[in-house]
Amino acid sequence: MAEVGAPSTVPPAQVPFLADLGVTLDGETLVLDLLPRHTNRRGDAHGGLIATLLDAALTRAARRALPAVQALATVEMKTGYLRPGRGQLRADGDCVHASGSLAFCEARLTDGAGQEVARASATLRQIRPAQT
């Protein structure tokens, strides 16, 4: 695992999409209380919502490992859906390896019963400001 730096400095409230969803923090874990607007027609967490929470957890993990990096982009992400998401959803991630401008991270999403709902791995890349 890459060495963990300071907590990620970007709270969900400062990411408009996460704020709109109602995502909060419990330490470094992203938390969302599932509402009807977050669900598919069966009443389970929508797959896109699950992917969003995992992507946000992956990004937070990369930011902890690369604290000097100002902006990151997910280059690729693999997601495995294990069971329907219900109740309170919790996402957390770890950086497996970081070097230069790349980070390789993993994240897990659990439900209100503590069961794993989905898992993801991703490569994230630093975005450098455009030269003017």
Image (tube, rainbow, N blue to C red):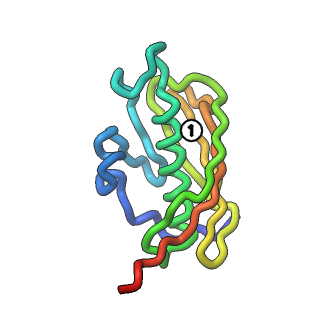
Q: Is residue 95 left or right of residue 71?
A: right
4 w.r.t. 14: above or below? below
- When the figure is inspected, residue 65 is found, relative to residue 107, above or below; the finding is below
Q: Which residue is mark 1?
A: 109
The residue lying at 48 percent from left, 34 percent from top is 89
**Crowdedness of circle 1 by 10 Å Cα count: few (<14), some, many (20+)?**
many
Residue 30 drawn at (x, y percent):
45, 46
Q: Residue furthest front?
A: 132
x, y percent for residue 123: 63, 59
Residue sticking out furthest to the top: 42
Residues 79 and 92: in front is 79
| Along the line of sight, the residue nearer the viewer: 37 or 64 | 37
**Residue drawn 46% across the image and 35% down it:** 49
Q: If the image is split into quadrants, where does the N terminus sit?
A: bottom right
Residue in the image at 62% along x and 70% along y? 102
Q: Amino acid at mark 1?
A: Leu
**Residue lying farthest to the bottom in this orientation:** 132
- Choose top left, top right, bottom left or bottom right for residue 43: top left
Query: In which quadrant of the rendered image does the C terminus lie?
Result: bottom left
> Picture coordinates of residue 91 (x, y %)?
52, 43
From the viewer's perspective, is 14 left or right of 31? left
How many numbered tags mark residues here?
1
* Residue found 66% across the figure and 50% down from its top: 121
